[in-house]
Amino acid sequence: MTNRHDPVSSVEFAAFRELHHPRYLSYARVWFRDAAQAAAVVEEAFCALADAWPELLGSPNPTADAWRILRATVAERGDPARVPPQRPTATPDEDLAILHYVVGLATPEIADVVGADHANVASQLRHALREAADW
C-alpha cells in the first residue's frame, strides 16, 4: 500500500517518473558534458517535483508544470561552457527543437513530455525551424 502523503512512494509519482525520466535525462544530456552531472540535475528536478507533487496534481496541467520545473533546474545548474554567451537558456521553441532534432522525439512524444497539445507543438517546431536561420 502506498502512502498518499509521501509523493515518492505514490503510484502516480512512480508512474510519472518512469514515463518522463528517460526523456528528461535525454534533454539534460544536451546541456551537460558529463552524463553523471546530467543525471544529478534530473534527480534534483525529481526531488523538486516530489516536493511540489500535491500542488502539481491539483494544477490544470501537471505535466507542463513539471516540465517548467525541469527546465528551471537545468537552467539553474547549466554548464556555461555548453551555452554561447548570447544564449544563456533555450526558449520554449528551442526546447521543442532540441527534443525533436537532437533527442529524436516525435511530435506526440514531445507534447506528452511538455504538457502541450500536438498541434501547438507542431506549430512551434515549424516556427523554430524558420528561426533556425538566425541561430
Image (cartoon, helix red, strand yellow):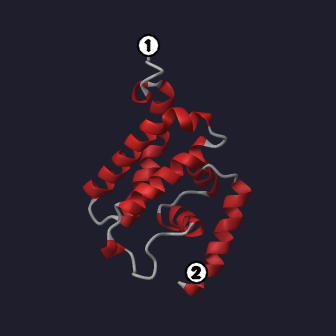
x, y percentage for residue 97? 56, 68
Residue 132, numbered circle: 2
Picture residue at 73% right of the left edge, 58% below the top: 119
x, y percentage for residue 86? 45, 82
What amino acid is at disc 2?
Answer: Ala
Count of numbered marks? 2
Q: Measured along the vertical axis of the image, is residue 73 above or below residue 49? A: below
Picture residue at 38% right of the left edge, 61% below the top: 76
N-terminal label among 1 and 2:
1
Q: Measured along the vertical axis of the image, is residue 8 above or below residue 121? A: above
Q: Measured along the vertical axis of the image, is residue 9 above or below residue 117? A: above
x, y percentage for residue 75? 41, 63
Q: Residues within 10 Å of mark 2 (few under 14, many from 20)?
A: few
Between residue 78 and residue 134, name the one nearer to us.
78
Does dot 2 land on a helix, a strand or a loop? helix
Q: Residues within 10 Å of mark 1 (few under 14, many from 20)?
A: few
Residue 83, numbered circle: none
Left or right: 117 as drawn, with respect to 84: right
Screen quadrant of the N terminus: top left
Between the residue at mark 1 and the residue at mark 2, the CA separation in whole angstroms equals 50 Å
Pointer 1 residue: 1
Picture residue at 40% right of the left edge, 65% below the top: 30
What amino acid is at disc 1?
Answer: Met
Between residue 94 and residue 69, name the one nearer to us.
69
Does dot 1 land on a helix, a strand or a loop? loop
Picture residue at 40% right of the left edge, 52% below the top: 25
